[in-house]
Amino acid sequence: MQIFWDPRQLAHAPSIEMHNGRIEPCSETPARAQAILDAVGPTELPRDQGEDPILRVHPRAYVDFLKSAHDDWCAAGRTGDALPYAFPAVRRRSLSLDRIDARLGRYAYDTCTPIAAGTWTSAYWNVQTALSALEALETDRTAFALCRPPGHHCGADYMGGYCYLNSAAVAAEAAIAAGRSRVAILDIDYHHGNGTQDIFYARGDVLFVSIHADPATDYPFYWGHPDETGEGEGEGATLNLPLLRGTGLTEFERALDQALDRIAAFRADLLIVSYGADTYAHDPISHFAIETRDYPLLARRIACLGLPTLVVMEGGYALDALGHNVAAFLSGF
Ligand code: SP5
Ligand code: ZN
């Protein structure tokens, strides 16, 4: 299986995030990518397809914000990572936001998602990595994009949950632009893929299916409930399967079978898997009970769909086991 990765994805090296009202060290670090690289073997560099594929998902104003946010933060006399702290949650309207502080809150929904000097560079190459892995499906059945930073929490015009550009969504749109007609996205990160869901919520040609921790107990709290099923043309093209904290292989497989049945019924011609290794039993920020030996079993079930499959990396924070978990998952295909 070809694996795509660009060293510029290491440029994003934030040091802090705000969580539970406290400043803490950021969980989403370059060391995560290094741990995966050490375990999965040789990788290919992506080719640069420019900004056009990104702009099919993310508006120009958001892209420009991401590009300049850290410089703007420094120009305002700040040092270190830019973090949003004020959000226009009430009576939103269109305003010209001159201060970087105001723009940060406009384009974010949480305080876990710092912008450091290298953030744009990494997010950009991260997307190129997914796009090149998608192209590899012209000859191969399965390809892996070592995406980092992750993408599934960010929507068209907002960042969140360590995510800045949504690689799975950009790849889905690129596939459709290249002639695929029905794309299924299976999100098996521990956290609900709220950004991906939002981007395709009213779309009937992209099915979004997510297995995740119940938002009643876990981040991102506001999205991922079973009654979120899509709207308009997209009614019925979103399926959320929340699970309780403590879920292990048996319960997870039951949900996975439901997810795969729905994908099969949708008659997709491409599958994109948003894979998070934070379902791992010993993940430091999550609460499922999947073991390393379980990941090949999950992948084998997914492979039984017989679809061309692009796997993109999302979360996973147990640094000592992360590489093994990713390698185990990929081995099942
Ligand atoms: C892609 C992904 O898995 N995003 C997860 C975002 C979860 N953010 C909320 C949890 C923050 C926990 N922070 C603990 C910091 C300890 N250093
Ligand atoms: Zn996650």
Image (cartoon, rainbow, N blue to C red):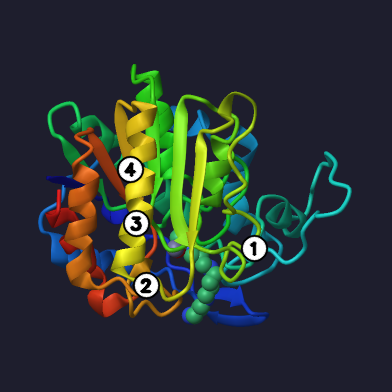
Above or below — where is 174 with respect to 311?
above
- Between circles 4 and 3, the one closer to the viewer is 3
Dot 2 amino acid type: Tyr
Ligand 1 is within 8 Å of the C-beta of the residue at disc 2: yes
Q: Earlier in the sequence, mark 4 or mark 3?
A: 3
Dot 1 amino acid type: Asp
Q: Secondary structure at mark 3?
A: helix
Image quarter hosting the N terminus: top left
Dot 3 amino acid type: Arg
Report x, y in % for residue 145.
27, 47
Q: Secondary structure at mark 2?
A: loop
Report x, y in % for residue 78.
66, 69
Q: CA distance from mark 4 to mark 3?
A: 10 Å
Q: Nearer the viewer, residue 225 or 205?
A: 225
Q: Which residue is mark 3?
A: 254
- Between circles 4 and 2, the one closer to the viewer is 4
Q: Are marks 1 and 2 in contact (CB under 8 Å)?
A: no
| Disc number for residue 102 | none
| Disc number for residue 260 | 4
Q: Are marks 1 and 3 in contact (CB under 8 Å)?
A: no
**Residue farthest along the right direction in this orientation:** 91
Ligand 1 is within 8 Å of the C-beta of the residue at disc 1: yes
Q: CA distance from mark 2 to mark 3?
A: 25 Å
Report x, y in % for residue 64.
59, 41
| Disc number for residue 110 | 1
Q: Secondary structure at mark 4?
A: helix
At 15% from the left and 66% from the top, the residue drawn is: 39
At 30% from the left and 65% from the top, the residue drawn is: 250
